[in-house]
Amino acid sequence: MTRYAHITGWGMAIPDKIMTNDDISKIVDTNDEWIVSRTGIHERRIANAEETTASLATDASIQALQMANLPPEKIDLIIVSTSSPEHIFPATACLVQDSIGAVNAGAFDLSAACSGFIYALNVATQAIRSYSARNALVIGSETLSRMINWEDRNTCILFGDGAGAFVLQASEEPGGLLSAVMRSDGSGGNALSVPAGGSKYPTTAETVAKGMHYIQMNGREVFRFATRVMAHSSQEAVEQAQLKMSDINLIIPHQANQRIIEAAARGLNFPMERVMVNVDRYGNTSTASIPIATCEAVKSGRLVSGDKIILVGFGAGLTWGAAVIHWTGPFPGKRRVRPKSLRIWARFRSFLRRFIRRVEGKIWKGYF
Ligand code: ACO
């Protein structure tokens, strides 16, 4: 029997701290007028010292589980798409698994920059469609503010922090993710990168002194690439879903730059009134931007059950991708799940497991 992966829950988490363009103009030589006219960004959210990629991802996940009315132990798969993981390893997804108490889930991170959420949605959908998972949690989470050179006006004006999460569940009813296009071109890798901190340039005093642990970007090159691929991949995803552009109710693009979004809409001959834009308030939250914009589209009534939508993004790699979704919403259910209270239990469970591991270590000392 054909299985479909429906999106039955969604949630977002953004830091409280707002950084306006005027705030940035006190740090580097820029101004509100320049930033707004080139990017459409007015302000962005910046994580405080306690907020991390995993903590934002956890908060967004709890909301998504609540919406889907799904207890964490029923999740089979957790994918965190991120370019600002908590550590090289363990995977941020494993930290989320522990903090929500998803005791039966496999968990891994996916690195495809701003296109990552679309990639992760596709991977989770294929796991559901092939009967390897029934319920999946897909998260896009970033704290790129930690990887920005706050003295580089070319990049520090663009990015913001945040997270968004979707719950995907199996159903025999047609719907959910209908198609997905994933593409890459590694020849453009140097247009947008964080050169050091990996195996090629391990962190040393020299890499730090040279600022190689910061985001480096050729803005014009990324801009040209983005405007080329956004419309084309959207069109491809619509054809793959055997639909026409006139069937699409809303486009939710990666929120990098208002001008890139407008160029994509022009390329598709699609009205801007049916394109979701919130880059003005959050800046570029990388892989988190699409799920955050989706949450806001639902909240504002712009996205309702039955709609067919395009998600489309581009990013470092270079990577790009698009997906068509038949939006349905939560499955009906009687038992009310309260993941927030389950979180307390998850904390206790995590503490207990660490404690047992320590005791085991003492008992087996000298044997292994
Ligand atoms: N304030 C004032 N002036 C600035 C600033 C600033 N913040 N930044 C650059 N300038 C200056 C430049 O120095 C340059 O001056 P010059 O002509 O004297 O040399 C001038 O403004 C024009 O610079 P450009 O880089 O040509 O400006 P452009 O119009 O291309 O806008 C921007 C720059 C906003 C970065 C644009 O190229 C862009 O949005 N590119 C895409 C970036 C992007 O989306 N990146 C994220 C990808 S997603 C991911 O994977 C994370």
Image (cartoon, helix red, strand yellow):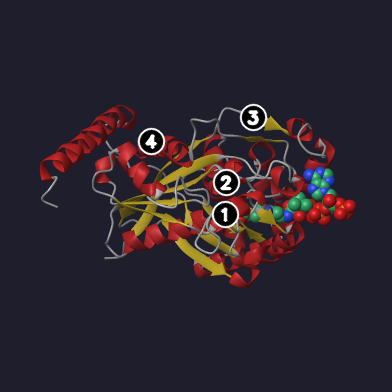
Circle 1 crowding by C-alpha within 10 Å: few under 14, some 14–19, many from 20: many
The residue that label 4 is drawn on is 62
Circle 4 crowding by C-alpha within 10 Å: few under 14, some 14–19, many from 20: many
Depth order, front residue of 245/325: 325
Circle 3 crowding by C-alpha within 10 Å: few under 14, some 14–19, many from 20: some
Residue 256: x %, y % from top left = 66, 50
Which of the marked residues, 1 or 4, is nearer the chain's N terminus?
A: 4
Q: Amino acid at mark 3?
A: Ile
Quadrant of the image occupied by residue 311 = bottom right
Q: Amino acid at mark 4?
A: Ile
Which secondary structure lies at badge 4? helix
Ligand 1 is within 8 Å of the C-beta of the residue at disc 2: no
The residue that label 3 is drawn on is 18
Task: Name the residue located 14 percent from the left edge and 52 percent from the top edge.
Answer: 368
Quadrant of the image containing the N terminus: bottom left
Ligand 1 is within 8 Å of the C-beta of the residue at disc 1: yes
The residue that label 1 is drawn on is 114
Task: Name the residue located 34 percent from the left edge and 56 percent from the top edge.
Answer: 173
- Of tags 2 and 1, the one toward the viewer is 1
Which secondary structure lies at badge 3? strand
Task: Name the residue located 55 percent from the left edge and 69 percent from the top edge.
Answer: 183
